[in-house]
Image: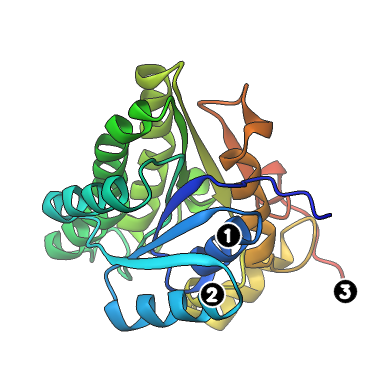
Amino acid sequence: MPQYRFKDKVAVITGGARNQGLSHARLLASHGGHVVIADVSDDAGSEAAEQLRSDGLSVRFHHLDVSDPGDWRSLMDSVRDTEGRLDALVNNAAILGKADFADCSLEEWNTVLAVNLTGTFLGIQHAVPLMRQGGGGSIINISSVIGNLGTTFNAAYSVSKAAVQMITRVAAINFAPEIRVNTIVPGGIDTDMLRALPDDIRIARLATYPLQRAGTVEEVSHAVLYLASDESGFTTGSEVRVDGGALAGVARAKS
């Protein structure tokens, strides 16, 4: 008999239609969970949910613009009416931005922070009441090593991901003991975001990672499963790094 680590629990995953979010949805559902993929892309979200259902998993789609409080209210109402409870929220939705600090327009700055930071804030704020009704839950915010290191590019993204780590700590203190709030800090994960970087930047960055390779979305998903499950019951306000050692220090590139 397989050991299910999320059996009969309910999770919402923002940005769940592709890449890391889709991987998180698949793993939580494969461990017996009921998963709601919440995404701004209706076509991609519906297709992802249908794909996972065809594999025998309990997954549905609900439209969500994470920067819209009305969308969050609609989503939580839907989860309350359909699943009856909420055990885990994965704040995964994010956008990258392109400009360095000097060239970042106010429009790009506001757009990136609206999704990456305000979206996380709204998710926590709207999920907490439903989680409390069910006796508690786990909120998992996805940050990035770029929030720790800073860069000469993607200024708004770097700042937003640093702020996600702080909002996690603040929320963990505010909503304990019923609700745990943690951050996952991925780095060098093989997703569209990594592949969108200029080749020279991507190759040079991975060469400095102690593990000397890109990570997989599944490796991040296993950290999500741990934090969503009861196994992490004494873990809150923490950062779990899935970064190939990037934040441990700079490794010498191997020939």
Residue beneath disc 1? 29
Residue 213 occupies quadrant: bottom right
Q: Position of residue 42 (x, y in %)?
A: 28, 77
Residue 255 is marked as: 3
* Left or right: residue 223 compared with residue 129: right
On the image, numbered disc 2 is attached to which residue?
52
Q: Which callout, 1 or 3, points at the residue further toward the start of the chain?
A: 1
* Marks 1 and 3 close (CB-CB < 8 Å): no
Q: Regarding mark 1 in the picture, which secondary structure is present there?
A: helix
Visual colour scheme? rainbow
Pick the front one: 126 or 217:
126
Using residue 229 as the reference point, say whether residue 104 is left or right of it: left
Q: Which comes before the other along the chain, label 3 or label 2?
A: 2
Question: Helix, strand, or loop for circle 2?
Answer: helix
Q: Which residue is rendered at x = 29% and y = 58% of the image?
A: 101
Relative to 153, does residue 53 appear above or below in the rendering? below
Q: Nearer the viewer, residue 217 or 41?
A: 41
Which amino acid lies under the numbered mark 3 shown in the image of this protein? Ser
